[in-house]
Image (tube, rainbow, N blue to C red):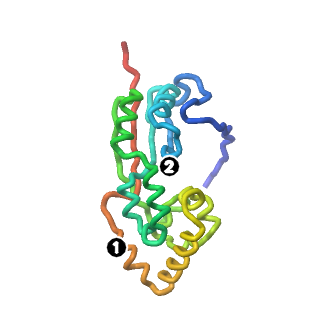
Amino acid sequence: MDCRCIDTPWQVAEAEKLPYANGSFSGVLCTLAIHHFAAIIPAFKEIYRVLAAGSFVLFTATSEQMSKYWLVEYFPEAIHKSAEQMPSLEEVRHALNEAGYNSVNIETYSISKNLQDLFLYSGKYRLEIYLDENVRSGISTFALLASADEIAAGCQRLAADINRGRITEIVKKYKNNQGDYLFVIADKVELKG
């Protein structure tokens, strides 16, 4: 397999004030970040401005989806705080419509057993990753919202449940068919006038 590195320049900017010219990009991907925006309508308008005809793809979760994560069993306060930050699907749709996108489509995403990434629920099937402080430090729910006491108690209970095999019944208790995350695909179509 031929893997080539692409030298990509990185820029730090606020989503509400991007340092790019109008129509600079043919597509925009936003991964697990809209809950960090100061305001989603201005951010979505700014992304619309820098997007030529193409798609704006958001990868996000709703508070309803997050309430079905088995992590609630061990870190209830942190997951609740994290879920409270998430704009509802209705708010996201409204903001995209306000920004001018022509169509909005939703696709659910469920974590797969072979997922290699490390974000909040990426350990759905790799339970032990949450016991690793280095992993938790890269997940904003743990790094910014969870108290040290909740993390210590939750990890202790999680480790004990993994060792006793009780974790299987905990995971089953939180099984759902609504997906773990969402892809929200908003299209900008150049209207010929």
What element does badge 1 sit on? helix
- Position of 151 compared to 55: left or right? right
- Which residue, given by chain and number where applicable, does mark 2 sit on? 32
On screen, 178 above or below 129? above
Where residue 180 appears, as percent x and y from the top left, is 39, 58
Question: Which amino acid type corresponds to the residue marked 2 in the rendered image?
Answer: Leu
Identify the residue at horizontal 49%, vertical 65% (top origin).
114
State the image quarter where residue 142 is shown: bottom right
Instruction: From the viewer's side, name the closer residue of 10 and 40.
Output: 40
Question: Which amino acid type corresponds to the residue marked 1 in the rendered image?
Answer: Lys
Where residue 4 appears, as percent x and y from the top left, is 65, 47
Where residue 126 appears, as percent x and y from the top left, is 50, 71
State the image quarter where residue 87 is shown: top left
- Position of 21 compared to 175: left or right? right
What element does badge 2 sit on? loop
Categorize mark 1 by other alpha carbons within 10 Å: few (<14), some (14-19), many (20+).
Answer: few
Identify the residue at horizontal 47%, vertical 57% (top origin).
81
State the image quarter where residue 188 is shown: top left
Identify the residue at horizontal 51%, vertical 85% (top origin).
163
Residue 173 circle label: 1
Identify the residue at horizontal 52%, vertical 24% (top origin).
23
Question: Is tag 2's residue or tag 1's residue first in the polypeptide sequence?
Answer: 2
On screen, 144 above or below 28? below
